Image (cartoon, helix red, strand yellow):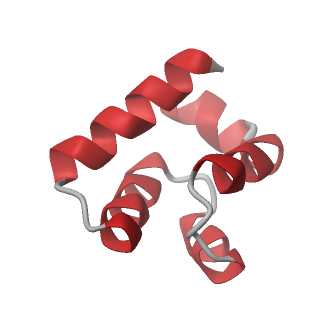
Amino acid sequence: MNKDIFEGNWKQLKGRIKVQWGRLTDDDMDVIEGRRDILAGKIQERYGLSKDEARRQLDDWEKSL
């Protein structure tokens, strides 16, 4: 999913993201605002993952959509 599609579908994706990564808060979602790189960073932060692992999880999740 390219950056424009991700940002354009942010409202629809927010709910799915919260189902997948339940530790993300509403405040996190407000900060992320559809920016994939920030989302990966928040996943990394909340779950204690490496940057590569957070990006891999996000890539896998996007492929499953």
Relative to 10, residue 25 above or below: below
Percent position of residue 34, x then y = 61, 52
Which quarter of the figure is the C terminus placed in? top right
* Direction from residue 58 to residue 44 in the image, left or right: left
Percent position of residue 28, x then y = 58, 75
Q: Residue at x 43, y 38 (%)?
A: 58
Q: Residue at x 38, y 37 (%)?
A: 57
Q: Residue at x 26, y 68 (%)?
A: 48
- 50 vs 11, nearest the viewer: 50
- Residue 52: image quadrant is top left
Percent position of residue 53, x then y = 23, 43
- 34 vs 15, nearest the viewer: 15
- Residue 16: image quadrant is top right
Tally of numbered tags? 0
- Residue 25: image quadrant is bottom right
* Direction from residue 59 to residue 1 in the image, left or right: right
- Is residue 6 visible in the rendered image? The answer is yes
Which residue is situated farthest in the bottom direction here? 27
Relative to 35, residue 44 above or below: below
Percent position of residue 37, x then y = 38, 52
Relative to 60, residue 26 above or below: below
- Is residue 2 visible in the rendered image? The answer is no
Q: Residue at x 57, y 69 (%)?
A: 24
- 19 vs 36, nearest the viewer: 19
